[in-house]
Amino acid sequence: MFSSSKNNVVPAKTKQQANSDKPSAPSILSSDLHVIGNLNSDGEIQIDGVVDGDIFTNTLMVGESAVINGEIHANNLIVHGTINGQIKANSISLMKTAHVVGDILHEDLAIEKGAFLEGRCQRTTIGSDKKESGKAKINLFKDKSNDDKDKSELAANNGQSGAARTTA
């Protein structure tokens, strides 16, 4: 029962190890908060206020009273409020109170009846060369070297849209 052997000693977990075992609580920005600047999180963010800046997160919940002016990069996105800017996410749900003005790059997209969307939707598997477990992930971090490539591809696609043009 009380042996002098030290072989049975189990080291206590460090704070960092203990915190990594359980998911962290979501970060909540309440309706009376106005943030100017970018938000970065590895966890979940719930926004009910105003954000003027880009958001990089794993999961983002945009509340009915929320207004976001900037790009969103997330794995999971649920929108009840207003977004003005480009969205890049693996899974996007636009609820009936959503108001989105901007392009959407997505893997999965669900739009409820009543949601407002003004922009272009494109199903994509961004970062498909970096597959994990057979599932493509969207690159959440902006790569400056791809900006010029994306712009040239967009310009080329606009010029070759396949639509007939008539002149009078």
Image (cartoon, rainbow, N blue to C red):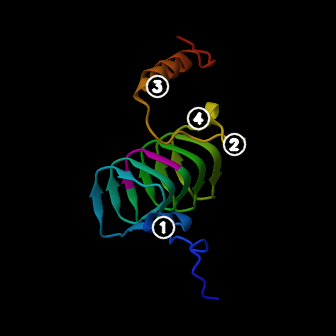
Q: Which of the two marks, 3 or 2, is nearer to us in this view?
A: 2
Mark on residue 146?
Answer: 3
Q: Are marks 4 and 3 in contact (CB under 8 Å)?
A: no
Residue identified by numbered label 4: 126
Residue kind at label 2, given as amino acid type: Lys
Q: Are marks 3 and 2 in contact (CB under 8 Å)?
A: no
Magenta part of the chain: 68-74
User: Circle 2 sits in a helix, a strand or a loop, which is it?
Assistant: loop
Mark on residue 135?
Answer: 2
Picture residue at 38% right of the left edge, 54% below the top: 68
Picture residue at 57% right of the left edge, 13% below the top: 166
User: Circle 3 sits in a helix, a strand or a loop, which is it?
Assistant: helix
Closer to us: 82 or 56: 56
**Horizontal and vertical percent for residue 27?**
42, 66
Of label 3 and label 1, which has the lower sequence position?
Answer: 1
Q: Residues within 10 Å of mark 2 (few under 14, many from 20)?
A: few
Q: Quadrant of the N terminus?
A: bottom right
Q: CA distance from mark 2 to mark 1?
A: 27 Å
In the picture as drawn, the residue positioned furthest to the right comes out as 134
Q: Which of the two marks, 1 or 4, is nearer to us in this view?
A: 1
Residue kind at label 1, given as amino acid type: Asn
Of label 1 and label 4, which has the lower sequence position?
Answer: 1
**Horizontal and vertical percent for residue 71?**
42, 44
Q: Are marks 3 and 1 in contact (CB under 8 Å)?
A: no
**Horizontal and vertical percent for residue 81?**
46, 60
Mark on residue 19?
Answer: 1
Q: Residues within 10 Å of mark 1 (few under 14, many from 20)?
A: few
Of label 2 and label 1, which has the lower sequence position?
Answer: 1
